[in-house]
Amino acid sequence: MKKKGIEKSKIKKQRVFVGLSGGVDSSVSAALLLDEGYDVTGVFIKTWHPDFLPCTWKEDRLDAMRVAAHLGIPFETLDLESTYKDEVADYMIEEYKKGRTPNPDVMCNKNVKFGGFLKYALENGADFVATGHYAQNIFEDENYHLLAGVDGNKDQSYFLWTLKQEQLKHILFPIGEIEKPDVRKIAKKIELPTAEKKDSQGVCFLGKLDMTEFLAHYEEKKRGDVIDENGEVIGWHDGAIFHTLGSRHGFTITKKGTEDEPYFVIAKDIRANTLTVSHKEEGSLKGKGSQSLKLENVNWILKNAPDPEAELSARVRYRGELLPCRVITVETETVVEFLDPQEPVAPGQSVVVYDGEECLGGGVVA
C-alpha cells in the first residue's frame, strides 16, 4: 500500500494540529511533520481529573509547552474536560456497575482525540490532526486503511477500531512506521525536552489506576462470597463490581487448601454479588469458552462488513493473541466465530478484527 496520495509540493502549507500530550511520541510526531513542511500547531488537551488522584496534567502541559517552544510552533490548550467526564469516565464507571468490562481508551480515542479534538481542529482551519499513536493510515483504492504500527510491541490499532473514513481522511500518524527505540533516538538527536521522559501507562489521560480504589468513590462496598468452581464458599470480597476476570487480588480466601497457588477470578455475578475463582486463570472453563461472540456498537472502517468466508483474525484484548475467526453479519446482527473455542470474554470488551496487518473495525461484546 502507498502512503496518503498527496504530493509533497502540495502539503507545504497544509495545517495540522498535533495533540501534544507532553510525551516523547507526540513530540517526535510534531517534529517530523514540521520537517515535512506542514504548518504545525501544538495542542494540549486538558481533560477531567478527579480530586483524589495525583494531578499530573499541569506538568504534562508544561512539557508540551517546552516542546512547542523548542520546535518554534504555536501552542494552544483545548479544554475537553466535560467531554472526557461524560464520554469516558462516566461510561467506565457505569459499565463496571453493570458488571461489564469497559475499555476507556477506545472511548477516549473515539470521543476525545478523534471526536472533540478533531472537531475543534477542523473548525479552526486545520486540514489534519496528528497524534503519537503507533498505527498507520494508508490511502489506496479510494479508501483509507488503518494498519497496525510497524512496532508490534507498541501497536495501538486495537484502540482505534471506531474510526471512520470521514475521520481518517483528516488524521496523520507520523510515527506509525517507526519503532519505539528509533523514536527515542530522533528525540535525542534533535534535543527534545521529552527525549528521556518515561511512557505514560494505564487509562488514557488518568494514568495507572487502582480500579477498586477508584470505583469506591462512586459505589459503596458490599461484602459478598468468593466461591470455588464447585460452588463452595471459600472467602469474601468487598463487591463484585470492583473485580475483573483474571484478577487475582482484592479478595480474601479464608478456607485454605493444600495448594498455595494464587486464585484467579473466572466469573462474577453482580446480582448475587459473588466471585468464582480458580487456581488456573481460565479454570474449568477452558475448552468451554465462546466459539462465537455477538457484537454490538459495530463499526467497519471500510463501511461494509467483511466477507463471511474471509479468513480473518481478532483480538479480544490489547496485545492479546490474534485468534483465527470469521465474521458473520445477518441484517443488523454481527457475530465473530472463532475457529477454536476461546476463554470466556466479558461483556463490554472490545473485539477488534484484522485482515493480516489491517484493522477492519470491531465491536463490543454484547
Image (spheres, helix red, strand yellow):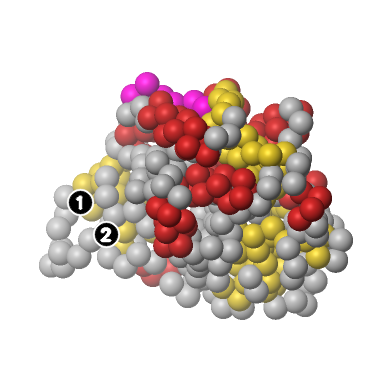
Counting from the top left corner in percent of width and height, residue 43 is at 58, 32
The image quarter in which residue 197 lies: top left
Q: Residue flagged by tag 1: what amino acid is it?
A: Ile
Between disc 2 and disc 1, whose residue precedes? 1
Counting from the top left corner in percent of width and height, residue 47 is at 51, 28
The reply to whether dot 2 and dot 1 touch (C-beta < 8 Å) is: yes
Residue where numbered disc 1 is placed: 253
Start and end of the magenta stretch? 46-52
Counting from the top left corner in percent of width and height, residue 12 is at 75, 46
Q: Nearer the viewer, residue 263 or 301?
A: 301
Q: Is residue 141 left or right of residue 178?
A: right
Q: Nearer the viewer, residue 130 or 110?
A: 130
Label 2, label 1: how many angstroms apart (C-alpha)? 9 Å
| The stretch drawn in magenta includes residue 179 | no
Q: Nearer the viewer, residue 316 or 63?
A: 63
Residue where numbered disc 2 is placed: 263
Relative to 260, is 62 above or below? above
Instruction: Rate crowding at label 1 as few (under 14), some (14 to 19) or many (20 or more) other CA atoms within 10 Å.
Output: some
Relative to 317, is 252 above or below? above
- Determine whether the residue tagged by mark 1 lies in a helix, strand or loop: strand
Counting from the top left corner in percent of width and height, residue 169 is at 77, 49
What residue is rendered at 32% in x and 29% in y?
54
